[in-house]
Amino acid sequence: MKWGAVEIARRSAIGKSLIRYRNAGELFGYVSLMANPENSRHQTQAIALTASEIWFLPEAQFRQLMQQYPEMEHLFNALLAQDLNGFSARIAQEQRRIQGLQSYIQAVPIGETILGDSKASQKLAEQIDRAAATLQPIVFQAQPGTGKTFLAGLIHARSGLADQPFAEFDCAKLPRSDDGRLNTDALFGRVGEQPGILKLLERGTLLLTNVQVLSGSDRDRLIHYCKTGGILPNHGLNGTSTLTNEPPKPVQSWVRLILAAPDRLDLPDADILSIRLFSLTQRKADIPAFALYFLTQFCQAQNRPLLDLDQVDLRRLISYDYPGNLTELAEILHRAVIMTPPGQTVVAEQALWSVQSTKNAFRVDLLTHVPWLRQVLLSRWYPEGIWIAMMAFFVPVTIAGFLGPQTRESSVTLNLFWAWWWPGYLFLFVFVGRLWCAVCPFMITAEWIRRFSLWLFPRQQLTWNTQWLNRWGAWILFGGFVAIYLWEKLWDLPHHAVLSAWLLLTITAGAIIFSLIYERRLWCRYLCPIGGMNGMFAKLAMVELRSTQQVCGSQCSTFGCYKGSGATPVTFADALPREGQATGGCPLYSHPAQLQDNRDCVLCMTCLKACSHRSVQLNLRFPTSDLLDNHQGFWAEAALLLLLFGGVFMHHADRILGWLGFPNIPINADHLLISTPIALALLSIPAVLTYGTHAIARLFDPKQPAYLTVIYAYLPFTLAANLTHYIPAAVTEAGQILPVLAREPWALAALAYQRSPGALMSQCSFRG
């Protein structure tokens, strides 16, 4: 060696093992010449550690010098003996080193890449490439199961240390002394005794996991090593790891450190590269790629064809939260491969029994378990095909209210509206929630007129002032329902067909006006009194429309269910022809992944038709689930609940006033000054009673929930009370619909004849 330094190494069980160093002025390569006969091939390998220059002596000159100066042979023999002793000592040391490192050495991923194409995966790939290009110490902020070992091995394999060993050391497995302190001898070593893993490894990459369990002084030693490359071994009492006034002499090492902890590590003054590993919950878009990778590995290990995951099972995998991250996903799929019977090509559903999102607990997706239901709801006949039948029914009934008989026993309008619609409508809330709003004739009329007006006068409709509507819209709705109640009671709408028809037209007019001005269905979501009642009672329903939030957040880029989009390609195998349709978006501006309850969903299935990932679910669940799953109430809705409860008292005003000793007080439009306060007082009875009861309860138990929380417990009772009021009419009058329908044409004909010129002339002649 003229100048510089080289090392002579060999392959071993832990990778490349160092044998000897050669520095400036030292000889190497003569061992094979001395040991082998002439005219044989000689080879010596050395790796330059620094920029070096080597003087070469040709073999012929070497032989000539040996013959010319025989005393050189004694010199070379002495060097050879010295080298052989050094080689023997080093080989013995290597054996001890290999034995000490055997349990820590990890396989290095060769030819592997980071799976997934999510933003998190792309960012991680960039950070790994940057880390591999340098030998800086690295800190992983990583939860258990996020792939620390794989990523550290990937950095090692792509770095300049790839031919050196890669090891992993778990600080959480260090033993503790009797006083509870960690014994870090296995990590740092002990003076005069055992070497630590940093010294044993010598060169390469060491992944230290669970660094957070180390004491502050131990972390200071890691910082010292990162800055100087010197290891400060333990000394003093067995198991201690604190620095004393006279620290031991540092032991030099060239190991690159990768430190890992669940939370952020504070390592001041250390020049480190920090990488945060995302949890699997934050990488939902990558789960399909991970699932395919693990299934491929496990199926190959069992010598069976690759198993497929159907769309429902893949959605279940994406919706699960994975406390154990990638490790848990791998175990789930490993178990699934084992549990799937031979000959079956798709992972068995029961094999994924442990994968259940908390949001889907005690729920059954009807779209999965009733396959034909998806086809029906995706068809062009739902809901717009029903609209035609609904309007063919609604328009004549409304007209009959103006032109037909006005009495309860003869009017088809009164019979259908008060004896059929109200009780049946309320009864259906428990089963199908706000389904009526998907086929509501008020909305249908407004929608058709809006479409015609936009075709006739193309224009940009106004957007919603959502902040204002969220604050005041429900109170306007509440005021509208108060007005309807007063109109119904004081003008006796249930017994006047023309007034009932005017009520229907008034609500329809509101829907039309706001549909012509604003985009989508602002009236239905915020201002319709009937819609407000529907949304509140829909919380009791046995069905709900939701979507898998993780699927929407990780796989969807169009958001057609919310804002509208063109047709979207559907890639899974059993896709139906009408999945991924072009839509104008949710008419109520609700994203199915953000629905907290049924209040803002009308089951129009726009989201189902737009979704190309089958994220939408139509779940069968326990009634009142919305009230039990982190329900968030608000005062305007609570006021509407109490108003609907008070409506039952108002409907039975005569009986209540009789109990109170006022049987002869009139409550009608002819006595507005007296009747209006009495009607309002009757409507407010539930509010007064429930608030008073709650106030008394809190006197005895201050830990009682707030009134706004408690009042929703009365929601099922409010629905039951309203049903109790309307069911007698359904039982006694609904069965008369056929006779009423039979009489209606004759009554209309008679009415038309009475108003005709011939009838008027006959009446005049008779009177004359």
Image (tube, helix red, strand yellow):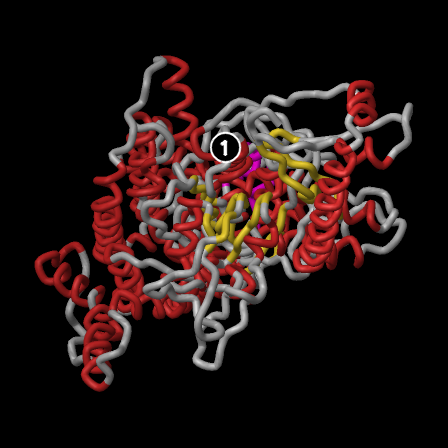
- Looking at the picture, tell me which residue is in the foreground, 80 or 3: 80
Quadrant in the rendering for residue 749: top left
Place of residue 759 in the rendered image (x, y in percent of width and height, measured from the top left): 36, 32
Q: Residue at x 57, y 45 (%)?
A: 205
Please give the name of the residue rendered at 73% of the width and 42% of the height, measured from the top-left corner.
Answer: 78
Q: Residues within 10 Å of mark 1 (few under 14, many from 20)?
A: few
Percent from the top left, x then y, of residue 450? 38, 24
Q: Is residue 32 visible?
A: yes
Q: How many marks?
A: 1
Measured along the vertical axis of the image, is residue 176 above or below residue 536? below
* 42 on left or right of 14: right
| Region rendered in magenta | 604-619
Residue type beneath disc 1? Thr
Please indicate whether residue 701 sits to the left or right of residue 115 in the image.
left
Identify the secondary structure beneath mark 1. Answer: loop
Identify the residue shown where x is 45% and y is 65%. 727
User: Closer to the camera, 352 or 768?
Assistant: 352
Front one among 21 and 518:
21
Front residue (pair 192, 168): 192
Name, please, the residue furthest toward the left: 673
Queried whether the magenta region covers residue 585, the answer comes back as no
Q: Name the residue tied to disc 1.
A: 134
